Image (cartoon, rainbow, N blue to C red):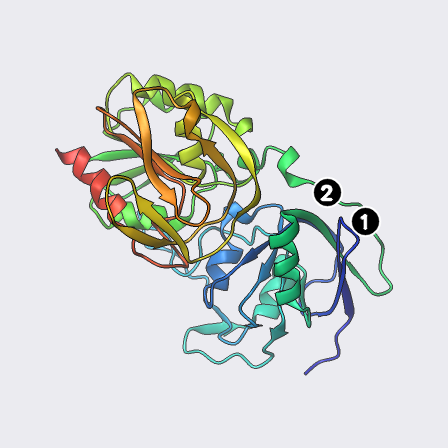
Amino acid sequence: MPETRKAVLTLEDGSVFVGRSFGYEKPCAGEVVFNTAMTGYPESLTDPSYEGQILVTTYPILGNYGVPADTDAPEGRVKDNFESERIHCEAIVCQDYSWNPSHWQSERSLSDWLKEEKIPGIYGVDTRRLTKLLREKGSMLGKITFEGGEDIEFHDPNKENLIDKVSTKEVIEYGDGDKTVVLVDCGTKLNIIRCLLKRGVKVVLVPWDYDFNKLEWDGLFISNGPGSPEFADATVEHIREAMKTGKPICGICMGNQLLSRAAGAKIYKLKYGHRSHNQPVLKVGTDKCFITSQNHGFAVDTSTLDSDWEPLFINMNDDTNEGIRHKTKPFFSAQFHPEASSGPKDTEFIFDDFVALLRK
């Protein structure tokens, strides 16, 4: 094991967690959140929904299977192994780090990857105590500093338009299917595109504030994304205009919140947020409960929905909203991640339902 430098995670309530560095050594600040996945750190690190956040992993060890190759994707497709083109979280925190990765897909170590992307990583932290603290007190701001280095101030990323920060700046087309889906990029995970392409549709990825109503399309898909949905007024107005066409519309995570705003609902900040890979979700009107992957800090107040809308899914832990649907038109959404990369794939049928509406 190489010599490592002492690193300190400080929370806004004054709590201090001391560890050692295994990534890039620069101070950073953001919202401290946790992830309960046993595997999938390449996917989680590159998930745009973690933009501005310090990610704590509850699984006790990271780095044991290294990092896969960042290979180019075939024309009209998207690359495998990652969920975007870069790491989005501010830093990653774990209990232990494996300096000797072993996996047939491993091309480099997690430590080397973090250093290449200039992202701090610290290990040796009591992540059980840290996660319990976050569960008791709710979401908190935090900062990471290094022994002998400079100090920095706390920073609240939810006061920024993180959607604009992670969204594409150009229109990009994928595939050549018989139906065209406009995918509004609020911070989309690449597996959303993979799931749509796998079902034989053409995907047109557009920036978050792009007026997609001037395009020809058969269905509208609104992606996940980081931060507060209150910054996406332009997207909400475009969704309202798209509703007039009566064409199928689906939203995931941030997409659920933006579709709900377009339906007249209000959004509120959760005390804790949903940050795990095993959230139980009930489909309303059935006895079907699904295990889902989630990462969001805001929720929909369904009591403020227009009367033409109703809840579609409910979180079984706290009864918060997990999706909505229109009572007569083909508009619906999910707060969780049916593309689930990484995470359980119990709800990938949502893509089947959406594409079936396109071809109905």
The quarter in which the C terminus is drawn is: top left
Near-viewer residue (295 or 177) = 295
Residue type of the residue flagged with mark 2:
His
Q: Residue tagged by mark 1?
A: 152
Q: Which residue sits at x=34%, y=36%?
A: 333
Q: Which residue sits at x=40%, y=41%?
A: 335
The quarter in which the N terminus is drawn is: bottom right
> Would you place residue 71 above or below residue 64 in this image?
above
Quadrant of res 269:
top right
Q: Is residue 202 left or right of residue 356?
A: right
Q: Residue tagged by mark 2?
A: 155
Q: Which residue sits at x=56%, y=54%?
A: 87
> Would you place residue 273 above or below residue 332 in this image?
below
Near-viewer residue (65 or 279) = 279
Q: Is residue 217 left or right of residue 124?
A: left
Other residues around mark 1 within 10 Å, as few (<14) / some (14–19) / many (≥20): few
- Find numbered disc 1 in the image and state the secondary structure of the residue it sits on: loop
Disc 2 + disc 1, Cβ < 8 Å? yes
Q: CA distance from mark 2 to mark 1?
A: 9 Å
Quadrant of res 158:
top right
Residue type of the residue flagged with mark 1:
Ile
Near-viewer residue (138 or 351) = 138
